[in-house]
Image: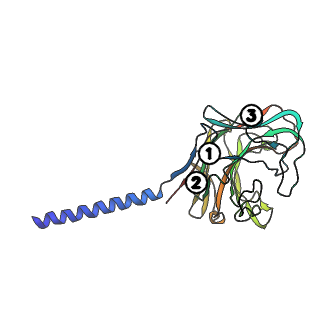
Amino acid sequence: MIKNIFKCGIVSLICISIFYGFSSILDDDEWKVDFFDDFETFDHNNWQDQRIWVNNEKQCYVPDNQYNTREVSDGTLKIKLINIEDNIVCDNMDKYGNQHPKTPYVAGRIASKNRKEFIKGKWTARLRIHGESQASMFPAWWILGAQNNEPPVQEPNENICWPLTGSGEIDIFEHHGDFGDGHYTTGAIKSLGECDKGDWWSLRTSVNTSLSDFNEYSVEWQDSDLVYRLNGEEVYRNEGLGDNYPEPMFAILNFAKITDTPMKGEWVMEVDWVKHEFRN
């Protein structure tokens, strides 16, 4: 009888150990949130305004919610591009010291640079675009290597040229209005091994969706792959390329105007929340 009780006890201990060991494995495989912003306010501990001139864009990025270009209201962030119908002097500079010309277009651009930066993991934003797509629209949700040497340069190690390692780029959501409504592109920028030499197209795809609906757009590191998801469903994968982006990365939300096509009024990208997750 005692032997049977002893055997039952041993079996129970083994079962418990196996159960908790399996549970631990499952826990290690689950995503855990280490950054979440639901935009009840504009939190300067999470974001800073970024003023920069890239891609020959036609707008001027302005700080401090000037012209209401990064409005926070009703629990969401509205990143806007606005035609103020008056050419203003723009202080945006490119990394070579060239100043943006006067323009009537102003916009918001925020970055988590030197605020919230993470190595790998999973980045997600829930967002939508107001109204119908228009030519020249270029809203984006993306991440960039934290050693990028473009403004603002705030740390000694921010000295690496795009898109070299340390300054790599992964585009989670970009909409190019010149190519019509109902789609976005997602994917990584392939570094060609030289400063300012990147392949924009070979590592990305176009995905159809309703841009005016709130959708969750994400990228995650899965082993050595980069996996892109729309509302939790995989839509694209950069196989074997995740380790090409080993650096801490920060997030960017911006609305650009990419061509000379005129626009009136305002364009709006509304962001419900942004989060980063990690696995043990």
Q: What element carries label 3?
A: helix
Alpha carbon of mark 2 to alpha carbon of mark 3: how far? 30 Å
Decide which of tag 2 and tag 3 comes sooner along the chain. Answer: 3
Q: Which residue occupies the foreground of this view, 175 or 86?
A: 86
Estimate how packed mark 1 is, as few (under 14), some (14 to 19) or many (20 or more) residues with alpha carbons within 10 Å.
Answer: many
Q: In this view, does 236 lie to the left or right of 108?
A: left
Disc 2 + disc 3, Cβ < 8 Å: no
Estimate how packed mark 3 is, as few (under 14), some (14 to 19) or many (20 or more) residues with alpha carbons within 10 Å.
Answer: some
Q: What residue type is labelled 3?
A: Asn
Q: Which residue occupies the foreground of this view, 75 or 22?
A: 75
Disc 1 + disc 3, Cβ < 8 Å: no
Comparing labels 1 and 3, the label whose residue is closer to the camera: 3
Q: Say the numbered circle drawn on residue 163.
A: none
Q: Which residue occupies the foreground of this view, 176 or 158?
A: 158
Above or below, 237 against 138 in this view is below
Decide which of tag 1 and tag 3 comes sooner along the chain. Answer: 3
Q: Say the numbered circle drawn on residue 122.
A: 2
Q: Say the numbered circle drawn on residue 68.
A: 3
Q: Where is residue 226 in the image (x, y as percent from the top left)?
A: 62, 59
Q: Position of residue 156 (x, y in %)?
A: 72, 63
Q: Is mark 1 on a helix, strand or loop?
A: strand
Q: Say the numbered circle drawn on residue 125.
A: 1
Q: Which amino acid does label 2 sit on?
A: Lys
Q: What element carries label 2?
A: strand
Above or below, 184 against 170 in this view is above
